[in-house]
Image (tube, coloured by chain):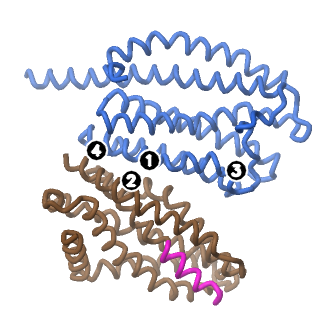
Chain colours: A blue, B brown
Amino acid sequence: MHKYANPTFFMRIANAVFPYAAGISILCFAVGIPLALVFSPPDYQQGETVRIMYVHVPAAWMGSMVYGVMAVSSAVYLIWRHTIAHIIARASAPIGAMFTALCLVTGMLWGEPMWGTWWVWDARLTSMLILLFLYIGYIALGDSFEDQERGDKASAMLALVGSVNLPIIHFSVEWWNTLHQPAIRSFEGFSINAAMLWPLLLMVFAFQTYYVSVLIIRLRGELLSAKIRTARFNLAAAE
Amino acid sequence: MSGFSTILRRELTLSLRSQGDVMTVIAFFAIAAALFAFGVGPELNVQSRIASGVVWTTALLAALLSLERLFALDYEDGTLDQLMLSGTEPIAMVLAKTLAHWLTTGLALLIAAPVVALALQLPTQAYGALMMSLALGTPTLSLLGAVGAALILGAKRGGVLLSLLLLPLYIPILIFGAAAVEGATLGLSTSAPYAVLGGLLVAALTLCPWAAASALRHALE
């Protein structure tokens, strides 16, 4: 595993993966969006509003998944001091925050026609909101130090501390029985009709490959800005 | 263990010498609660309805107030380096400082809470639950706060950043603390929120000193 810690080697693999990830993402969106928003059947209870699910559910899954990636990368960074792991975590944070925000916004838009309210303070919604604040806190903490490495370490530790929220999000609909419906995916399989399941899975796959593609673009940017910093430093030292 | 009691005694002596510390926390608690009373107006039944949430929210904000300086003063003048080098286990040092923080804020809030609750017309049957939930919840606030205070050492905007980091993590404690008081007001059983608050306290007591000590080590590298 440790040979992947070399940024040059890692980016060579990432750059090779990029066209496939981006291509699959575009393809899945191109098929998934019409399927989900037009051709899939309306729900017998919720009518056409069920189509919000095809954006809401993948966004929710990605919101927690990206935080999981951040927490694992931060642990790798703190244990083995691999800088690339922290760069992955830092580059993931804004993407994960956007997924979480998208989940909350679509959830509100869905809640208004279904529950008659934009927002309820139930466990699932509250824990997703906490997740968004954790993302914002992570980004803010990383930017708050003049010594970059200090910010890296502090934000990596915060990512680990905040990971206690992930199981709370996952089990919140089982522990507290509230307005939010139970999970679609469980150990017994999927509690959803096949005509809705396929568009949903396509959208999930599109979101996942989208995350991988954007992450690689952001990684390139992060590594380039690190190179520029070093170059400027050398230039200043030479003068 | 001698290091633990020495640091605890030092912290308590320091905060008792500048009596302002404890008084500021209580004064902030009372004023913030009064703001709610002014904000919702003088109707007694409205105040009594929201009293449980207001007391818990303001107590939580007051506990946050003094956290920024938990390690910051010692960090700036170099005492923290000495403490880390003194041979005392860093976890014991964190625990001593956290306990001192709780004794000077959590305990002070616990003593002041019934008076503030009285002014907000909290129903009589809820006082036991208010004291019990604060006793179980405020140590967790101090423990989580120690992690946050250690993470922000040397940051450019300490106080605001600390609130941003800690308040999301404080939400579960607020929910179950207020739920206990609310339940007692309505005459329901309060054992479930107590159990959750107790569980959170045990988890925080196990993990937070370790996380804070590790954050301190990184801060001083």
Residue on which disc 4 sits: A145
Numbered range of the magenta stretch: B123-136
Nearer to us: label 1 or label 3: 3
Disc 2 secondary structure class: helix
Quadrant showing the N terminus of chain B: bottom left
**Do the residues at discs 4 and 2 belong to one chain?**
no
Q: CA distance from mark 1 to mark 3?
A: 25 Å
Identified at 76% across, 33% down, the residue is: A190
Few, some or many residues within 10 Å of mark 4 (<14, 14–19, 20+): some
Asked if the residues shown at circle 2 and circle 1 are in contact, with their CB atoms under 8 angstroms apart, the answer is: yes
Query: Amino acid under label 4?
Result: Phe
Closest to the observer, B13 or B43: B13
Q: CA distance from mark 2 to mark 1?
A: 7 Å
Answer with left or right where residue B79 lies relative to residue B25: left
Q: CA distance from mark 4 to mark 2?
A: 11 Å
> In the image, is residue B126 part of the stretch drawn in magenta?
yes
Identified at 67% across, 58% down, the residue is: A121
Q: Which mark, residue B161?
A: 2
Few, some or many residues within 10 Å of mark 2 (<14, 14–19, 20+): many
Asked if the residues shown at circle 2 and circle 3 are in contact, with their CB atoms under 8 angstroms apart, the answer is: no
Query: Amino acid under label 1?
Result: Gly
Q: CA distance from mark 3 to mark 4?
A: 38 Å
Few, some or many residues within 10 Å of mark 1 (<14, 14–19, 20+): many
Residue on which disc 3 sits: A173
Residue on which disc 1 sits: A137
Answer with left or right where residue A153 lies relative to residue B166: left
Marker count (numbered)? 4
Quadrant showing the C terminus of chain B: top left
